[in-house]
Image: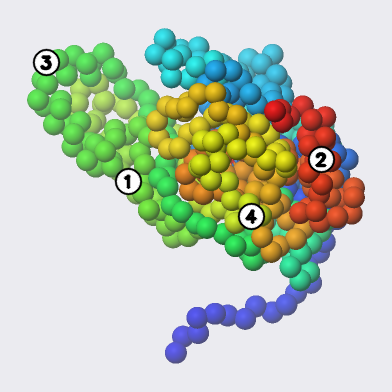
Amino acid sequence: MNPSTIHEPARETPIIANVDVLVVGSGPAGIAAALAAAREGASTMLIERYGYLGGMITGAYVVAILGVGDGNQPVARGITAEIRERLMPLGGIKPMHAGTEEEYDEFGPSGDYIVDAELFKWQAAEMLVEAGVRLRLHTLACDPLMDGNRVIGLAVESKSGREAILASVVIDCSADADLAYRAGAPCDNATHEVTLGMRLEAVDRERVEAYRQANPAAYDAALSAARQLNGGVLPGGSRRLRDIDIADAEALTRAEVEARHGAFTALQLLRQRVPGYEQARIAATFPQLGVRQGRRIRGEIVVTDEDLRNNRRYDDGIARLGVYFPDWGPTYRIRGLAYDLPYRCLVPQGVDGLLVAGRCVSSDYVACNTLRLIVPCFCTGQAAGAAAGIAVELGCAPRAVPADTLRQALARQGVNLG
Ligand SMILES: Cc1cc2nc3c(=O)[nH]c(=O)nc-3n(C[C@H](O)[C@H](O)[C@H](O)COP(=O)(O)OP(=O)(O)OC[C@H]3O[C@@H](n4cnc5c(N)ncnc54)[C@H](O)[C@@H]3O)c2cc1C
């Protein structure tokens, strides 16, 4: 009988750092967490598996920073505002609402903005280095190191081999709560559509349009056949693959293969059948698969859809926000909301020495669709970083950080607490 497991021998792992706060992941949550922790005076290190910072912003070109306002006016400040101000003079910001009247109506005076992904990569690194954060790119955080139910650091793997980093507080900003899950924190996992973004170029739109007018039936048939090959969208469109479990590498592999298969076979067909597409090519597929939802921790409190709709306030509120995005569709379905995000949704049940920020904080499935927007991720990241810094300063567990002290720190850091 073939064994189903193998026993790996124990080994000595070099400790390469011993820091106050160790952040995993450099998406909006991780960047904000590392900045906030360092600004609270904590020695801080940030681990990222790729060679650039930004998470989905730069890995999947999700450059529309949504969730700044409540549909009537901008609400979020803190890191959200700082990044805008930092990139603005470099020409790295466009307002989201500077479009057609229809778009203006959809987005309202939201304060939402669009970033230049390359400038973002550069400036995020500059900001972190200026704040004194030690960066470690090309490094995968693998396993939490535990002392009982307390996380005391992480084992990481990279070109340098397997290494250990010790920390008083670890902040899991991996987007999928990978480290929290491995540390034993209770989690929920839900699938949502995933998208492999891509850039199509060299379509001669004028010739395509001329063909459409001259041969409408043949044109429609060709486009319909192309869409059928590619999950309902033309190559270059935002195809949504369903039922992909992001916690399963086999499923992620299937998604990558299927997304490319569909797009390229559809494109071959269009090149053969539609004049104007002959030279068309997929010039880039984005480095990171766009994942909308995955694992979420169960924390000291679970933020629900109802909490957001009903403007729920909390004594441990770490940010006042106002955007509501239950699922697909216009972002500001309900205008003028003003709800709090509670600190307790960053604190996992049953595991100490650990906080979580970003799209994997403790919420229900529908609320997660709002909390996964980039601005709420900046907010939970900034709060987790500040809380971790305070926990180190006070010598207490993150779950014992006094709400008042945290709120004072966040107010000093420019966060809107309402
Ligand atoms: C297709 C798509 C479109 C979207 N559109 C919008 C939009 O228009 N506006 C908007 O505001 N939001 C949008 N979102 C949502 C938003 O982009 C994400 O929810 C948000 O970026 C999540 O932030 P995060 O910091 O939690 O995680 P991420 O941005 O995913 O960052 C996580 C980081 O952690 C790193 N990481 C993970 N595991 C490890 C590990 N073990 N070791 C080291 N590093 C690790 C990853 O490489 C990554 O850099 C969209 C999402 C998708 C998928």
Kind of residue at badge 1: His
Kind of residue at badge 3: Ala
Q: Place residue 162 in its image quadrant.
A: bottom right
Residue identified by numbered label 2: 404
Residue identified by numbered label 3: 214
Local packing at callout 3 (Cα closer than 10 Å; few below 14, some 14-19, many 20+) is few
Foreground pick, 382 / 207: 382
Work out whether mark 1 precedes mark 2 in sequence or the reverse, and give the earlier one: 1
**Circles 2 and 3: CB atoms closer than 8 Å:** no
- Where is 345 relative to 72, above or below? below
Foreground pick, 400 / 255: 400
Kind of residue at badge 4: Gly
- Where is 103 relative to 231, above or below? above
Relative to 49, 209 lies left or right: left
Foreground pick, 235 / 30: 30
Foreground pick, 259 / 279: 259
**Circles 1 and 3: CB atoms closer than 8 Å:** no
Residue 37 at x, y = what percent? 80, 41
